[in-house]
């Protein structure tokens, strides 16, 4: 049912502006902690032997958390959106230095680690950084030696449809899972069909497609076919174009494919800041798309609760682009995150031939800035042999003194 009531839209806006709840309290002092890209700054020195409160504010532009290891356990805030605050209650601690860090995947490696002094103790032994040149070299070498590291789960694999009376039928489930982002780094995620990104859907202009979604999440969800021209009732915005798909329910999206060949996204549009950040996104390819190439690689960029990822994985678990000398390579860039990601390819220039699923006058570059929600198709010729880095040039998303991490992969020309 279509819903156009103004009160519903206003309710959505009001909900998005509601302040975050805070909890906690303490008698050993109130310590202010500011989180930023990419640092943790604590002001104050709590008394030893008394409970205290950490008042944590996310002063950055992306999500962060704060964790402290205390009394044999890790105490952590919820995921804090930009500008949000939370009070964290900490039990009595003996005098000493205690480590603070952000638990979002990749953020600790980017420098979000610090130390808190309790009772005037020195924090020198826990301060982040300070690696010797030899240690920095070793950690960089170990990361590259491990690439491409094996992890459990592979997203973005094309999903074969079932043909029913000429309709291409794709079946999706939305599930809460545990996802291995990089070796040994396993996080809570939401996923279509148990993988991040969700399966890649391929259709042709003129097809009729049907997507049957079953919601196994602990909350409602939906699917929005980002950038595609579809009937209003299929647009996937709860309380505006459809009811939400509640826990345990199934909803069927069906529409003709009228878009010119190109690349598009699909993602949740309900509690989307959380759900998309946790992995509810995927790719729709309307074939044949841009000029045909020998190799095609989809690069979905994410920066939510899974950290800085390419196709749901952080380096060294990202997958390389492999081509033979002289082959042409298509890269589909999709930004499902909240930050700008200037993707820089070493050793080559590529031609951008489409934007947001629409062909464009080709232009050539080697660093393409992909904004949130944007989709680009780029082509290059693998005419320069060797292994070449391909990474986000916001360097905190890709490299630190601990080595490469997050949004890094490689082009390997054989």
Image (cartoon, helix red, strand yellow):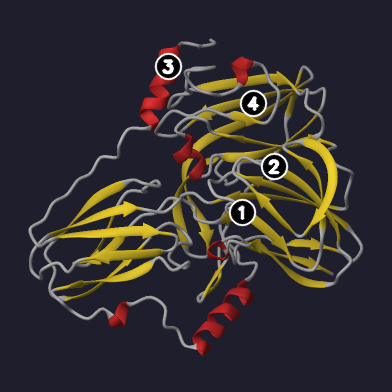
Disc 3 and disc 4: Cα gap in Å? 26 Å
Q: Is residue 377 above or below residue 383?
A: above
Disc 3 and disc 2: Cα gap in Å? 30 Å
Disc 4 and disc 1: Cα gap in Å? 30 Å
Q: Which residue is mark 4?
A: 211
Disc 1 and disc 3: Cα gap in Å? 34 Å
Q: Residues within 10 Å of mark 2 (few under 14, many from 20)?
A: many
Q: Residue at x 11, y 55 (%)?
A: 26
Q: Secondary structure at mark 1?
A: strand
Disc 2 and disc 1: Cα gap in Å? 12 Å
Q: Toward which corner of the image does residue 261 lie, by quadrant?
A: top right
Q: Residues within 10 Å of mark 4 (few under 14, many from 20)?
A: some
Q: Secondary structure at mark 4?
A: strand
Mark number, residue 341: 1
- Is 191 situated left or right of 67 in this image? right
Q: Which residue is mark 3?
A: 8
Q: Which residue is mark 2?
A: 375
Ranked by sequence position, the earlier of labels 2 and 1 is: 1
Ranked by sequence position, the earlier of labels 3 and 2 is: 3
């Amino acid at each position: 049912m279509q819903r156009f009531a103004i009160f519903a839209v206003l309710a959505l806006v009001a909900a998005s502006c509601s302040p975050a709840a805070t909890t906690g309290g303490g008698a050993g002092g109130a310590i202010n902690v500011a989180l930023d890209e990419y640092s943790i700054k604590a002001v104050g020195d709590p008394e030893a032997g008394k409970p205290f409160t950490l008042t944590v504010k996310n002063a950055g532009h992306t999500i962060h958390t704060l964790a402290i290891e205390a009394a044999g356990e890790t105490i952590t805030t919820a995921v804090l959106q930009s500008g949000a605050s939370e009070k964290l209650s900490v039990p009595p601690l003996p005098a000493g230095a205690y480590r603070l860090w952000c638990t979002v995947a990749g953020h600790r490696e980017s420098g979000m680690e610090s130390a808190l002094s309790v009772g005037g103790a020195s924090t020198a032994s826990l301060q982040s950084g300070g690696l010797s040149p030899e240690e920095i070299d070793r950690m960089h070498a170990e990361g590259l030696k491990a690439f491409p590291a094996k992890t459990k789960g592979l997203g973005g694999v094309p999903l074969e449809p079932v043909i029913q009376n000429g309709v291409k039928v794709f079946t999706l489930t939305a599930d809460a899972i545990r996802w291995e982002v990089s070796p040994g780094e396993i996080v809570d995620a939401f996923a279509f069909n148990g993988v991040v990104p969700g399966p890649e859907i391929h259709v042709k202009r003129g097809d009729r497609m049907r997507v049957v979604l079953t919601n196994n999440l602990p909350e409602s969800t939906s699917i929005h076919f980002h950038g595609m021209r579809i009937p209003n009732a299929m647009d996937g915005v709860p309380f505006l174009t459809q009811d939400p798909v509640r826990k345990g329910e199934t909803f069927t999206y069906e529409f003709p494919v009228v878009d010119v060949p190109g690349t598009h996204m699909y993602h949740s549009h309900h509690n989307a800041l959380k759900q998309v950040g946790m992995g509810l996104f995927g790719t729709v390819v309307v074939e044949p798309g841009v000029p045909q190439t020998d190799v095609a690689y989809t690069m979905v960029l994410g920066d939510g609760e899974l950290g800085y990822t390419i196709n749901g994985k952080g380096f060294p678990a990202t997958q390389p682009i492999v081509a033979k000398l002289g082959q042409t390579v298509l890269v589909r860039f999709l930004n499902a995150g909240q930050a700008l990601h200037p993707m820089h390819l070493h050793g080559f220039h590529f031609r951008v031939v489409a934007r947001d699923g629409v062909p464009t006058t080709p232009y050539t570059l080697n660093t393409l800035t992909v904004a949130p929600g944007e989709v680009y198709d780029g082509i290059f010729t693998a005419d320069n042999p060797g292994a070449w880095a391909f990474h986000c040039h916001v360097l905190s998303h890709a490299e630190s003194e601990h080595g490469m991490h997050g949004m890094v992969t490689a082009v390997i020309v054989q």
